[in-house]
Image: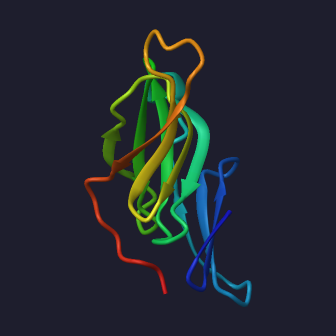
Amino acid sequence: MFQRNDSLFVFDYYRDQLMIFDKEGRQLDSIPIYHHYHPKETGWKKNLIQDRVTGQIYAVMHLAGYTYIRNVNTTTGKLEDKVQLEYRYVEKVEIHNNEVYYIYRPYESPLKKYLYKERLPMFYQKQK
């Protein structure tokens, strides 16, 4: 469940729907979603995150050690703009103001983990 401006987005994977409610709790729309099908092929690990500044919702996919960020279109329910993060085996992915932050331990570095930042190629305006 995510909030953007005065709308509430509820992902109901049991019914394959994204339901949208207004601030009064009235259902405005329901959109079919299918990005959770075939998790082994897509890398879907039941992980959605939201950029609190822009309000955009992203699906995080893991495939062959790489992490992919995909924007969830809340109008169509489809995934868009597949972005691969630079490093493999990253941890704790978060998105803030169109930038991805994550923890990564460089190869052959026994203990030190570092915070990395990457700018997303797509740009979204701040929410109201």
For this orientation, the residue located farthest to the right is 25
Indicate the position of residue 94 as horizontal and vertical percent values: 54, 50
Indicate the position of residue 53 as horizontal and vertical percent values: 50, 71
| Image quarter of residue 30 | bottom right
Indicate the position of residue 100 as horizontal and vertical percent values: 43, 49
- What residue is rendered at 42% in x and 23% in y? 88
- What residue is rendered at 25% in x and 54% in y? 121
- What residue is rendered at 43% in x and 65% in y? 97
Quarter in which the N terminus is drawn: bottom right
Indicate the position of residue 19 as horizontal and vertical percent values: 62, 67
| Image quarter of residue 125 | bottom left
Tell me if residue 116 comes above or below residue 6 in the rendering.
above
**Left or right of residue 9, residue 63 in this image:** left
Tell me if residue 1 comes above or below residue 87 in the rendering.
below
**Left or right of residue 11, residue 114 in this image:** left
For this orientation, the residue located farthest to the bottom is 24
> Is any part of residue 38 visible from this angle?
no
- What residue is rendered at 28% in x and 59% in y? 122
**Left or right of residue 38, residue 28 in this image:** right
**Left or right of residue 80, residue 92 in this image:** right
For this orientation, the residue located farthest to the left is 121
> Is any part of residue 69 visible from this angle?
yes
Tell me if residue 94 comes above or below residue 26 in the rendering.
above
Q: How many numbered marks, from 0 up?
A: 0
Coloring basis for residues: rainbow
